[in-house]
Image (cartoon, rainbow, N blue to C red):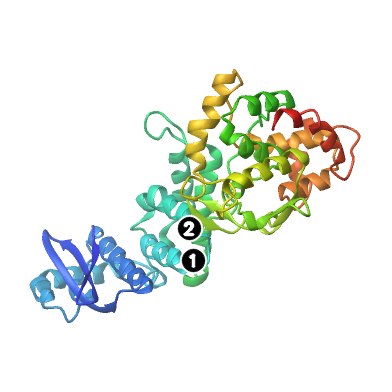
Amino acid sequence: MASISLRSNKLVLDFRYKGIRCREQTALSDSKINRAKLTKLANDIEAAIRLQQFVYSDFFPGSPRAAQFAELDSKIKQQSNQLEKSIPSLYHDCPTFNAFASEWLAEHEGVWKASHLANVSAIYEKYLLPNFATTRLANINRADILKFRASLTKPQGKNKRISNDWINHIMVQLHRLLAEGSKRYKFENPFVDIEPLKIEKPLINPLTLQEVRIFLAGVRSDFRHYYTVRFFTGLRTAEIDGLKWKYVDFERKQIIVQETIVNGKVETPKNHSSYRSVALSKPVITALLAQNDLTGHNDYVFCNSAGNPLDHRNITKRIWNPTLQLLGLPSRRAYETRHTAATLWLAAGENPEWIAKQLGHSTTKMLFERYSRFIPNMTRQDGSAFETLLGLVEGNTS
């Protein structure tokens, strides 16, 4: 495995070839862009070595080390010339999957959200590169793609099978890379008319109002305000993690969703419609005012003793799951707090368009698809019905 180091303020590529350690000094200064370039070069070298097509003098023509491999370079060139005669010239300049993937990901640094880039990179490392790394893009055909997808449907260690939903996510990244590669290198995109796998819609499991009352009465007092806000605003996990006091408007009784926290890093909201103002009911205002006495001197509304945002995975493990178990409530994901807010609004008869805006949906389509069984016949439009419903709870959340 090649590595990159620094010597005399210049980047050095360190790799092994034929059992020999090779270190090549470059003229590149240490920067993010130059490291990306050198990483791409390292990937190209490793791919060429695996294919037994690595010609040292082609990659490092001025290197003293090249003379050591001159005889081997000559043999490989002769073999390559014979091979190229049987391969269409179209494919000669087409990069390997590994090389183009490195270029593709480097091009999207700073364009994609850091969390999205990390997720996509993980898909490449775990699934795509092990299967396609040394294959030239133009040589990947429809059968290769379908065989790869079929392999993903089989148990992956400890008899665990990847969900169809996650397989579709993996295939989307393969589709996008091949589509871009086909445009740049003028080959026919093999990923055509391959439909995504069918996925079963997960059954949501929101808490009833009675269960919310039981939970808030039984949860640790230092997390009662936190869960009151989650249950009655429908904020996404990343949104409540990134909630700062400057985005809480007590005068207008609303929260402005402007920032999120994903994997410990500040991000923008999920999409355009996620930038929104969320109306606050009386229990939420009461909880936030009380929380302000505790953390109002910090940036984040809900934070640890050092003022840093909470780790929702840790909170779920230490607070959410144990509280459900202690109170005898059915186990469910912490994200059900968002579904709970939506279903309580619907049960109160609020206008679906108002609810959709509260949740950050661009239309009511998702609302009706996901919560259809919770929608009553009569609806209101302003949130007042929900206030009436919560009047039953207000005395139990203080």
Q: In this view, which residue lies farthest toward the top?
A: 328
Rendered view: 73 above or below 118: below
| Rendered view: 2 above or below 163 | below
Q: Tell me if mark 2 has few (under 14), some (14-19) or many (20+) residues whose alpha carbon lies within 10 angstroms of its own.
A: some
Name the N-terminal-most of marks 1 and 2: 1
Residue farthest along the front direction in this orientation = 293
Label 2 sits on a secondary structure element that is helix
Image coords of residue 344 (percent x, y): 77, 33
| Numbered mark located on residue 329 in the image | none
Tag 2: residue type?
Leu
At label 1, counting other C-alpha atoms closer than 10 Å, the crowd grade (few under 14, some 14-19, many 20 or more) is few
> Which corner quadrant of the image does residue 100 belong to?
bottom left
Q: In the shown orientation, is residue 388 left or right of residue 304?
A: right
Image quarter hosting the C terminus: top right
Residue that label 1 marks: 108
**Rendered residue at 53%/46% (across/down):** 303
